[in-house]
């Protein structure tokens, strides 16, 4: 498949905003035009050409060769295919609507901020506040799928509305806080504060570090919706799908300090 | 069920000892939707589907025409359990939705271990969960996966899962038919059973009457003002009293009505049914195949029997 390649020349001297660089936005531009795009304002603006060696076909996918934790907003508003061979900074994949973003390194804070759709895969770790809604926004992740192969930080999927977050490593505190829908699957277990003030939605993991007093134990149950979710994940993300749940999960309902329609499913029983 | 006033149009054809009238089945445009009902076992998926499609023979008296299309293997159902696909036909999408709401609410929601999913992919949707989910009395919760939303309704054996929307098509066909005429009821019935069995292998169609077979074919209108009444031209016991379509040896007529999601599927079902009757031959007393029509002026779809012969 044809791709536009952006080879990182060196670590940027300051944080850069790459929100202009998505396949749909660049499709009609020439290499020269892309090189002139300003990605950091200031006394001495930085352009794409200053940071990256640009080559390839702008009408195809976007391929970053090399990464840095100073590359912010990678894949923001993306509707195409983006691959990053390295780390990214904050707000990667923010408000993506569909398409895919694969980060073959670590992601900074606020990965998938207000995500609307599509698929984000982080091969390394992700920072705090995955899905974080910015000021004035009602929802965190509002659709799509985020898969973190490594660890995720605190407050993952706060104020999540829809979609799926799968964390294959450890997940930080307060996952799913103030959640309003969607699913978080923490394959190594949920940490302290998971589901704090959640209204709706589902958190799944083998264990929970400390159950909040505002969650009630409803016992172990074979839930059909789990089978439906497993089939959906298998069909949409294939090998990246979480492991099949073989034992009837324990269902905790909460947060009863609110409307209490959320649930934590503990697959170790 | 159909009027036979102008059933015969030309010279009949004879195949394997059975006469096929040169006539056509006249069918109508309808709206239709479909569901996949699953359960812990195939037995209970089928039980739920049978209950839901009961009293669904004629849209005139039942509000909808319903039936089982086929059994869905676990690998093809959304929840990996055995399933049954049912189809439901009505005059308009809203009427199909109303019927689904009642039938699912009373017959699927109530059936042990059941779940209910959309069974027809279409850009036009109707509400599937609109009634049943409120049985949850506020405890119902939804889960959106991709573009589909599922409702989870707490019930006494766990959770009833139902998809939020079902697809509906407005170019479905209702009223495809064939009439099997013979010398004795047992033989005609047995032959019709073979035809229904053959039709059941065709996807996207149902035969909504009991066992797929109608003994009370009707004509339009009635001296009492009812919308339909007995098809006297095909009633053997009236042969001398009316303008009968039957011969002296014709003692029984049974009809197979076919509804399909597409005109093509009704055509395929007609072909399968005719082939089965002709293959069975005259040994059971079947003498003739005809079809019901209204002269061709009422229904948009005409299925000329000669075009569907094997």
Image (cartoon, grey):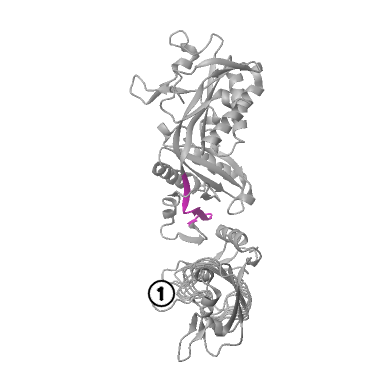
Looking at this view, is A77 or B152 the one in front? A77
Placement of B273 over or under A230, stated as above or below: above
Q: Position of residue A135 (x, y in %)?
A: 40, 79
Q: What are the residue bounds of the magenta stretch?
A: B153-168
- Could you tell me which residue is drawn at 58 percent across and 67 percent down? A60
Looking at this view, is B303 or B125 the one in front? B303
Looking at this view, is A266 or A120 the one in front? A120
Q: Position of residue B35 (x, y in %)?
A: 52, 46
Q: Is residue B155 toward the left or the right of residue B278 in the image?
A: left
- Could you tell me which residue is drawn at 43 percent across and 78 percent down? A134
**In magenta stretch: residue B155:** yes
Placement of B219 over or under B249, stated as above or below: below
The residue under label 1 is A137
The picture quadrant where one finds residue A1 is: bottom right
Q: Position of residue B171 (x, y in %)?
A: 46, 39
Placement of B80 over or under A179, stated as above or below: above
Q: Position of residue B261 (x, y in %)?
A: 51, 39
**In magenta stretch: residue B278:** no
Residue A252 seen from this side: no
Looking at this view, is B65 or A130 the one in front? A130
Density class for disc 1 (Cα within 10 Å; few <14, some 14-19, many ≥20) is few
Quadrant placement of the C terminus of chain A: bottom right
Q: Is residue A161 toward the left or the right of residue B190 in the image?
A: left
Q: Mostly what secondary structure, the magenta segment?
A: strand
């Amino acid at each position: 498949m044809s791709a536009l390649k952006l080879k990182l020349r060196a670590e940027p001297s300051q944080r850069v905003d790459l929100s202009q660089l998505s396949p749909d936005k660049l499709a009609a531009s020439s290499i020269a035009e892309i090189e002139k795009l300003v990605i950091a304002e200031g006394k001495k603006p930085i352009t794409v050409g200053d940071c990256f060696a640009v080559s390839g076909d702008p009408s195809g996918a976007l391929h970053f060769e090399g990464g840095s934790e100073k590359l912010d907003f990678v894949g923001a508003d993306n509707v195409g295919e983006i691959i990053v061979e390295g780390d990214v900074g904050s707000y990667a994949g923010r408000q993506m609507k569909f398409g895919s973003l694969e980060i073959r390194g670590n992601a900074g804070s606020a990965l998938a901020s207000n995500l609307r759709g599509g698929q984000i895969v982080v091969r390394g770790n992700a920072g705090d506040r995955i899905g974080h809604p910015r000021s004035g926004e009602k929802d965190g992740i509002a659709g799509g799928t985020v898969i973190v192969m490594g660890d995720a930080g605190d407050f993952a999927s706060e104020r999540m509305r829809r979609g799926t977050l799968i964390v294959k490593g450890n997940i930080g505190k307060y996952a799913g806080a103030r959640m309003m829908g969607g699913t978080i699957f923490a394959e190594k277990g949920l940490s302290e504060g998971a589901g704090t003030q959640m209204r709706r939605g589902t958190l799944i993991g083998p264990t929970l570090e400390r159950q909040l007093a505002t969650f009630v134990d409803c016992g172990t149950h074979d839930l059909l919706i789990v089978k439906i979710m497993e089939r959906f994940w298998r069909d949409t993300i294939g090998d990246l799908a979480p492991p099949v749940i073989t034992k009837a999960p324990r269902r905790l309902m909460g947060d009863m300090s609110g409307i209490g329609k959320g649930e934590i499913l503990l697959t170790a029983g | 069920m159909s009027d036979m006033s102008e059933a015969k149009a030309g010279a009949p054809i004879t195949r394997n000892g059975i006469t096929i009238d040169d006539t056509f089945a006249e069918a109508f445009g309808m709206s239709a939707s479909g569901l996949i009902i699953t359960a812990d076992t195939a037995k209970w998926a089928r039980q739920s589907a049978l209950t839901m499609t009961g009293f669904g023979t004629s849209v005139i008296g039942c509000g909808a025409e319903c039936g089982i299309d086929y059994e869905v293997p676990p690998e093809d159902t959304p929840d990996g359990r055995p399933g049954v696909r049912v189809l439901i036909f009505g005059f308009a999408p809203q009427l199909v939705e109303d019927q689904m709401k009642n039938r699912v609410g009373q017959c699927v929601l109530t059936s042990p271990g059941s779940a209910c999913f959309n069974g027809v992919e279409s850009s036009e949707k109707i509400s599937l969960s609109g009634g049943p989910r409120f049985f949850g009395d506020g405890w119902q919760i939804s889960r959106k996966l991709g573009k589909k939303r599922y409702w989870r309704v707490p019930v006494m054996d766990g959770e009833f899962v139902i998809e939020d929307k079902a697809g509906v098509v407005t170019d479905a066909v209702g009223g495809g038919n064939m009439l099997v005429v013979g010398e004795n009821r047992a033989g005609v019935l047995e032959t019709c059973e073979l035809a229904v069995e053959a039709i059941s292998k065709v996807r996207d169609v149902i035969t909504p009457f009991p066992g797929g077979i109608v003994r009370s074919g009707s004509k339009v209108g009635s001296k009492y003002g009812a919308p339909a009444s007995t098809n006297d031209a095909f009633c053997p016991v009236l042969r001398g009293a009316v303008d009968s379509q039957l011969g002296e040896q014709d003692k029984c007529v049974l009809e197979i009505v076919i509804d399909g999601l597409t005109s093509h599927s009704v055509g395929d079902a007609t072909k399968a049914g005719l082939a089965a009757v002709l293959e069975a031959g005259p040994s059971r007393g079947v003498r003739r195949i005809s079809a019901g029509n209204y002269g061709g002026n009422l229904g948009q779809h005409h299925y000329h029997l000669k075009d569907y012969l094997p």
